[in-house]
Image: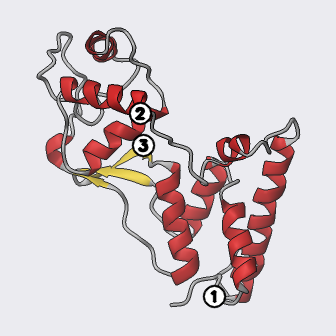
């Protein structure tokens, strides 16, 4: 099955796929639900309430738009999933399981702070790193994760990609005071074009 963008010229496709980056998560989830594109993480055999990373979801959306195929959801091995909260006392050799990395779990945050000399920050870098471990089928020890975080922080590691529209525009000096209006315009252009393409393809959209 051909993707919805098959009928567009290459320049039009490129522009529309760039507009896609300006959708907010609510708009992305709505589009995914309409086209049965998965956006939640599956842990073991169960879907979670956790939304996957924006670049990963938009990769699935782009693939669908270009090919008509729906890629599978992110699946985490049951062996690295813990449904219960972590114990109150943790050791550096304990493993950081899925659902244990949470800023509300003080023992987790405290141990990571201790292992990094007080440097640890619960930010985008930490979340990207831990998901890389989990999606590879591993739950790292707290010591291993802390060392990886220090190495990535001192690197430094650039996490900005096109899917993060504001950060990308900020790097290019294009995130002025009217950026919110720009985002809304670009997102609405994508949604309007998609509605027309869906209608032409007989897939609804209105």
Residue 18, x across and y down, in percent: 69, 63
Distance, label 2 to label 3, CA atoms, is: 29 Å
Answer whether labels 2 and 1 touch (C-beta < 8 Å). no
In the depicted view, which residue is nearer to us: 49 or 5?
Answer: 5
Q: What colour scheme does the image use?
A: secondary structure
Disc 2 marks which residue?
A: 155
Label 3: which secondary element:
strand
Residue that numbered label 3 is attached to: 50
**Kind of element beneath mark 2:** loop
Residue 74 lies left or right of residue 36; in this view the side is left
Q: Nearer the viewer, residue 197 or 181?
A: 181
Residue appearing at x 35%, y 38% in the figure:
129
Image mark for residue 174: none
Residue under label 1: 6
Residue found at x 73% / y 46%: 172
Name the N-terminal-most of marks 2 and 3.
3
Residue under the point 74% across and 79% down: 11
The vertical placement of 46 against 20, above or below, is above
């Amino acid at each position: 099955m051909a993707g919805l963008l098959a009928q567009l010229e290459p320049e039009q496709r490129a522009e529309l796929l760039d507009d896609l980056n300006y959708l907010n998560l609510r708009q992305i989830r709505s589009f995914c639900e309409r086209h049965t594109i998965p956006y939640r993480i599956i842990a073991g055999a169960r879907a979670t309430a956790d939304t996957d990373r924006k670049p990963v979801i938009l990769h699935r959306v782009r693939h669908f738009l270009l090919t008509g195929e729906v890629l599978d959801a992110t699946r985490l091995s049951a062996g690295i999933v813990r449904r219960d909260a972590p114990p109150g006392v943790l050791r550096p050799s304990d493993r950081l399981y899925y659902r244990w990395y949470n800023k509300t779990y003080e023992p987790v945050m405290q141990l990571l702070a201790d292992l990094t000399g007080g440097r640890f920050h619960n930010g985008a870098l930490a979340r990207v790193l831990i998901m890389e471990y989990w999606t590879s089928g591993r739950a790292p020890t707290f010591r291993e994760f802390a060392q990886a975080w220090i190495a990535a922080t001192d690197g430094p590691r650039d996490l900005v990609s096109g899917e993060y529209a504001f950060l990308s525009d900020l790097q290019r000096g294009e995130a002025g005071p009217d950026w919110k209006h720009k985002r809304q315009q670009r997102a609405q252009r994508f949604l309007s074009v998609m509605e027309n393409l869906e209608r032409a393809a007989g897939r609804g959209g209105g």
